[in-house]
Amino acid sequence: MKTWLLLILFCSQMASQGQIFYITPAGDTVQKSNGPSQSRGFKLIEPEIGDLKQYFGEGSFAIIGDTLQLKLNRETYPLNNNKFIVFYYKINGKQYSKKVAFDKQKLLIQKSKLIENPADSVNRDGIKNLYVYQFERSTKKAILITRVNLTFHSKEKIAKEFTLVQQYAKKESIPVDDMKKYLHTYFTDLYGETDEAALNRNITEFLSK
């Protein structure tokens, strides 16, 4: 049992006060939340993105599964043979600069394209210091958008974690709608920013089983 799972046994009365405590997988950091997020609706379809810096943030960004598709605003981020998005990063001291695949205006972030060498498989910390650039081939102009720590998490792993949180929530007789918020808060508190629609779809799918 991972150290962070102790959160399920940690002072259950704190839930009644609207507080949840999380222990990271490393067991060395405790984060406190003020309870389920009330600031965002439970969106399942994400609108097109007009600000990648705001979307990714500047801390950690987590992806559930091996692929994430983002619909970008055509005026802000046109995707074609001349203008596209580039990821710059290092793994085990080796430098990479990769054009991110796209399909029309959908950006395709794929683990297999970023981590090509099996020996460089993503560890708990994922890809640290991944720089996101908007690049124009004709002028060789690169505009830095943001820098993030990118991580990938299998759906199976997240489902197991959600199961433990759900078991705790059921003991506290938390309604289904609030359960969604608890799972949402759990994930974002532990792993950082993520794609809202993708996370919400995973939560909805998990609770429907």
Image (cartoon, rainbow, N blue to C red):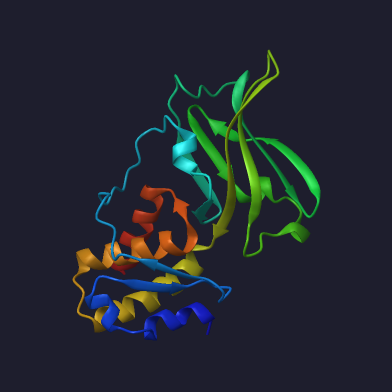
Q: Disc count in the image? A: 0
Q: Nearer the viewer, residue 199 or 13?
A: 13
Q: Residue furthest top?
A: 138
User: Seen in the image, is 202 located left or right of residue 112?
Assistant: left
Q: Position of residue 115 (x, y in %)?
A: 69, 51
Q: Nearer the viewer, residue 21 or 194?
A: 21
User: Seen in the image, is 67 located left or right of residue 51?
Assistant: right
Looking at the rendering, in which quadrant would you find the C terminus? Answer: bottom left
User: Seen in the image, is 80 located left or right of residue 16?
Assistant: right
Q: Position of residue 78 (x, y in %)?
A: 51, 21
Q: Nearer the viewer, residue 133 or 99?
A: 133
| Residue name at image x 49 percent, y 68 percent | 156
Location of residue 58 with respect to 185 vertically, above or below = above
Q: Position of residue 64 (x, y in %)?
A: 49, 57
Q: Position of residue 49 (x, y in %)?
A: 41, 33
| Residue name at image x 48 percent, y 35 percent | 52
| Residue name at image x 30 percent, y 83 percent | 12
The quadrant in which residue 121 appears is: bottom right
| Viewer can see residue 208 | no
| Viewer can see residue 200 | yes
